[in-house]
Each structure stands twice: as C-alpha cells, then as structure tokens.
Amino acid sequence: MAKKKYKYVNDLWKDSEVKKLDAANRLIYRSNKLGSDQRITNTGGGNTSSKIMETDPLTGEKVEVLWVKGSGGDLRTSKKENFASLYQEKLIALQTVYANKKKRGPKSPAEDEMVGMYPHCTFNLNPRASSIDTPLHSFVPGKHVDHTHPNAPIAICAAKNSKKITKEVYGDDIVWTPWLRPGFELGLALQEVSAKNPRAKGVMLGQHGLINWADDEKDCYYLSLDLIEKASAHIEKAYKKKGGDKKAFGGQKHVTLPEKVRRKVFAKLLPWLRGQVSQQKRFIGTIQDDATILRFVNSKDAGRLAELGTSCPDHFLRTKIKPLYVPLKAVKNKKLDDAFVEQYVETLKAELTAGLKQYRKDYATYYKNCKRPGSPAMRDANPTVILIPGCGMITWGKNKSESRVTAEFYNCAVEVMRGAEAIDKYIALPQQEAFDIEYWALEEAKLQRMPAEKELARQVIVVIGAGSGIGREVAHRVVRDGAHVVCVDMNLDAAQATAKEITDQYGVGIGVAGSGISNCGPAIGLACNITDRASVRAMLDEVALAYGGFDSICVTAGVFWPSDTTGHIPDDKWDFTFGVNVKGSYIVGDEAANTWREQRLTGNLILTTSANAVVAKKGSVAYDTSKAAANHLVRELAIELAPTVRVNAVAPATVVQGSSMFPRDRVIGSLAKYGIKYTEKESDDSLRNKLAKFYAGRTLTNDPITPEDQAEAFYLLLTRRLSKTCGQVISVDGGLHEAFLR
C-alpha cells in the first residue's frame, strides 16, 4: 500500500526500523520522529506516551505501565532515560485521593499537591520526574497519546472563533475544549470529554495545542500527521485567499535592509543592547533575520500583534508575556553607507532606550495586577525578545542554547499569529492565565531545583591563539566552567578545530533558531591577524553577531624569532616580533575598549608575556625585549581601561609541550645547544619531552610547565577570585629564580 503524501509535515516512519524495537523503544522512536519536525512541536514542548504491559519486578505479574516523556525533556532528542514510567492502576487510583481533598479545583493547592503523589506511582524505581501532563496521558482512553504543539492547530486554538473552526476542520474527530492550565484537573476534564465523545480521536485544547490518541502507535503517529496536515491545509487556503505573503499581517510597512547593512547594524547595536538588558544578570543573544521573521517585523500589524503577546504557554515561558517591538522612525539617509549605519544605530538606540523603559514599567504593572498571595518575587523585567523593523529579531537567554530556544519559540508564535489571522482573528492568552503559568509555584520549584550556575556562566570569552598550546587549553578551561568561548587564531582551521573539540564535547545545545553565525553553540572558531586593526574589528563584530557581545579577552598569541649565530635579527623579523607580541595586544585592547564602553559590563583583558621579559639571555633579543614591552603595556592598559576592565598578564616560562612556538627544528636546535642527546628518528613528542625536562631542571619545582598550568592562571584571573588584582603579571614558571620580582 502506497504511503500517503504530506505537504505540511514530514512522514519519517519506517516499518523496517520499528519492527526491530520493543514497545518502550517504539515510543522513543515515535517521539523522536515527531520532535524532529518543528511544524509538529517546538523544542522541549509537548509529550508522548504509551501504556505498555510490563512484568512487575515485585510480583512477576503483568501490569499496565504508562511510559510518558518526563519533565524537561525534548521529543526530538529524548532517549529512554528521559521517560517516566508509572503504574497505570495507581495513577487512576489517584483520582480517589484527589476527590477526598476538601478544597480542590483548577489552580488549587490540592491540584499542585497531586504532583507530589506521582513518585508513589513509579514503576521499577525509574528516577525520571514525571511531567505535569501525566494525568492527561493516563486518563484519556487511547493506549498511545501524542500531545504536540503544532503551529497550525495552535493557530486554530488561538483564533477568536476557535471552537467553530475546530468543528469545520475536524468534524467529530476532534473535540474542542476551553483552555485549562496543565495539571490534574485538565486530565479529569479530558477524561470526561472523551467519555462523552467515545468516537473522538482527540481534543483541541483552547490556546494550547493538540492531544490525540490511538490504540496502535503507528496509527497514533499518522493521526498526528493527518490532523496537522488538515489544519495546515485549511489555513493555507484561507491565507492565499487573503493575499498570501504580500498581504500577511496587513502587508508590508517597512523595507528590509540589505543583509550586509543589517550585519553592520547588528554588530554596532548588539553590545550596547546586551548591556541594557543585562542590568540584573548577563544575557547571551541570538539574531534571527530570515525571510519569515522579516515578513512579520516589517508588517503593518506587527506592533498590534506583538503587544498581544503569545498564546501557547510553552512559548511565553521563554518569550515572556510579550516582546518589545520597536516602532522605528524612518532614517533620512538612503545611501546605505557607513554614515547611514551610524545614523540608523543611533536612532535605534533612542527608540530602544524609551522602549525598554516602557517595557519594564509594563512588566511591573503586569506583575502587580496579576500577583497572588505567595507569588514568587518579580523576575527580571527586561524583554527576552526584541523585534526591529528592517532588521529582524534579537532574543536573549542565560546561555546560547536558551537564547536559540527563545528565538525558536517566537518563530512558532509568529506562525501561530499568521495562521490565526488568516482564518479569523488572533487572541492571546489572558494576562492572568499567563501570569499563573509564569509564576506557578511548580515552575518556581523547578527553577529552584536547577543546579547553581557555574562561575563563568553567562560570559563570552575571546581566546586569541586558541588553535594550539596555551590558547587551546584556556579555551577548554573556561568552557568547563560555563563560559562561551570564541576560539581565534591566524590559522582558521586550527581555531575551528578547537571550537569543534569543545562543541563535540559539550554539544551545540537545543533550539533550532539563529541566522548565520548566530546559530552556534558554546564555541566558534574565527581567524584574525591581531596586527591588523581591521581584522581585529571584523573579528569582534563577528563575536557580537554570534553572542551579542563579549566579556573578556585572553591574548595567548605570540611569536619567537631567534637571533642567528652572530646575534643578528633581520629588521623585518624584529618588526614582526614586536608587531605580534606588543602592537597586536595593544590593537586588541584598543578595539575591544570600544565594545566594552558600549556594553558597560565589567570584563577582563589578559595578555601573555614571559619570564624572558625580566631575564636577559643570548639568542632571543627580539622576543625578550618585546615581552618586556608587553609587561609595561599591561600596566598602561590597566590604567586606560579601569575601572570597567581589569588588565593583567600571565608570564609563562618555556612551555614546550603543545606549543606551536616549538616546532621540531627549534626543539632540535635547542637540544643541540644544550648538549642534550637525541636521535633524528625520535618523535616530536619525545624530543619535546626531553627539552621540557631540561627546562624544568632549571626551576625550583623541577616540574615541566604545561599549557594546562597556564590555563589555570588565566581562569583565576577571569573569575572573581582575583577581582582585586589589576595591572599585574602573574608568573607561572615553576619557580625560575632569575625571574623573581625585583
């Protein structure tokens, strides 16, 4: 039998793959396939379940077990360990427990208390916490249940005449039911609805999403696809009839800036804006400026719809009650040159300053009007979504992953508004209902259970020279403690290799949004020539586009050019050495200062000097002198950049292992110079180890100096542990007495 063709969803089911799986893994398979299509559900949104006969480990009898996606999981990426398993019989018995409570009902303490009962229903000691939607899955009749957040059905949910449209689209297959906050009462309500409508295949929950069921998992999967396909086709027919893209959201009001101009605007604007929204805690930014989001932000109705806020609770938990829409005034300069960019950014800053002030005021009013006795304290009043006509959308989160998820969710919200406006009129969730979700005691408890943020969380750290040696280790060290890292090197391949190592280890995170470089994870790799100011500026602009700005810079790049046998160094090599080791660090600090001033957030600049800066020796005059100059550069920049930025340095001594400054020929030359035996057949690592041991023997600790040793010093200077250290050079040389402070 030929497979049905779908236009608006992806059919990913393969019988050949499914037949190899047991019942629980078939649930995982179904969940992953549904979650992989963003038109079906958003990242982290929705849940799936199967009622499976299992052998009770206590009695050996067959019992019915509800396997349901656990709290905080994501359908696209979930594995078996992300699913809770509960005795179905015990879940049903909870209805009696709830009925015996004196005061019960939607949003009652009794309803929330039932969440604490779910662990008592756990099958086989499964530690995964159950979802708040567990009753929904347990109490409806189907053996398999899909609760997804597809854009098209949610658009119907968010339409003014949602009930009527649901009937038009689905007939008696799907029953519309009004909004009810997820929880025990919703499970009971759906149980009642399904009992009264035994032929129904599912429920459309007002302003939330789709819930459908079947007794066969394949049937359940295809039912989900069929229902979404029907809603999508209905919307698209109405959308085209109303004029399609040209008339979407009332038609176009603003013109999109060319991509190159948008990039320049974002690069100049974002650090300033990051500073504005990071008044309580630092945020990481994501840019979205694809055709879909631009169609919305440029439209006549964007301001009206943005003010209404989002509909689906999953959306606004990230996007907040509403975004900040910037009613941008026209900029007179039409040449689209650098002067235009400057004027445009200044106009935006003025609009955003006023907009942010009003947004915070509105949020405080929303909190004051909706708060209940015992509500948690008001959270950060800054917007997480900012919409700019002509440019696109900027979203904020505590890390890159969360920032991308926020962007993804507002993309979903835009599609919901498009669909609702095509078939009817969009309505948002009432503010009180939104507040009761956002400030729900259970949501607050979930936030409180989250592990404490790591020491460098919410920070973006640029590591120059990250392609090898000390820089590579610094990059790995700061990410381990929560930082986002920009790996920079003259060699782009080397920079990207380090970034890939980090991304492979920590993952790119969840969320499927972000345009261009902004669609990144915790690390990116960039090329830069620090002796070229334009190259440095271009690199810092890319950092702004990726993360919204940066907090600290570590310069580990350096070059060593030895004197010849007569002690001579060619003029060009002298200039090159000073260019990289001194001028380059100055240019980095000077250009970064422009960003730091805009951002107005504290940061660090850490340079790499050397023990050689204070130890005169033969054969390295250019290197030693340049590092001495770098020592003083630290002090000068410390004065220039204080108090916002602390400037310090780390002074290593002959780090041989892992250093690009010690190629094989230099190592052999040094071994010969010091009379250390070696053979030409020895590996690079063997030769380096011999030289490292020799250098270690000249120190008080007699221990080779490694890149990891240096990275730890950088890490300490980046944290608040040495927050009162400024203008200093910290030696990490194993105790080289010739370099003692004088």
Image: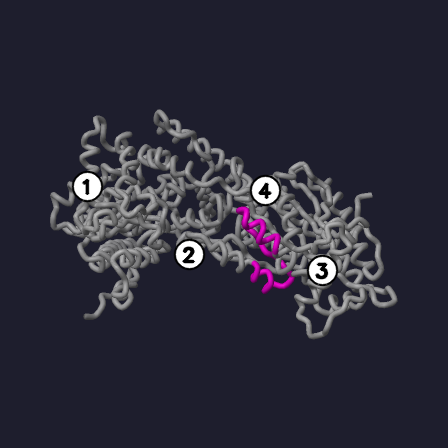
Q: Which mark is residue 344?
A: none
Q: Among all residues in the image, which is located at the extreme bottom?
A: 681
Please tell me which residue lies in front, 289 or 146.
146
For marks 3 and 1 on the same chain, the one whose residue lies earlier in the sequence = 1
Q: Which residue is mark 4?
A: 599
Real-space Cα separation, disc 4 to disc 2, in angstroms: 29 Å
Is 640 inside the magenta-drawn segment?
no
Of the two numbered discs 1 and 2 on the same chain, state the one appearing first in sequence.
1
- Binning the other alpha carbons within 10 Å of mark 1 as few (below 14), some (14 to 19) or many (20 upward) gives some
For the residues labelled 3 and 1, the Cα–Cα distance comes to: 69 Å
Query: Can you identify the residue that label 2 sits on?
Result: 291
Q: Which residue is mark 3?
A: 692
Work out whether 133 lies above or below 494. Answer: above
Cα–Cα span, label 4 and label 3: 42 Å
Q: Look at the numbered discs 4 and 2 and tell me whether their residues touch, using CB distance below 8 Å.
A: no
447, 175: nearer the viewer: 447
Q: Position of residue 37 (x, y in %)?
A: 33, 57
**Amino acid type, mark 3:** Ala
Query: How much space separates mark 4 and mark 1, taking CA atoms?
Result: 55 Å
What is the number of the mark on residue 92? 1
- In depth, the one of 363 and 376 nearer the eye is 376
Q: Is residue 346 visible?
A: no
Q: How packed is label 2: few (under 14 Cα within 10 Å), some, or many (20 or more)?
A: few
The picture places residue 211, in percent across and down from the top left corner, at 23, 48
For the residue labelled by badge 3, is the local secondary structure a helix, a strand or a loop? helix
Q: Amino acid at mark 2?
A: Ala
User: Bounds of the magenta span?
Assistant: 473-498
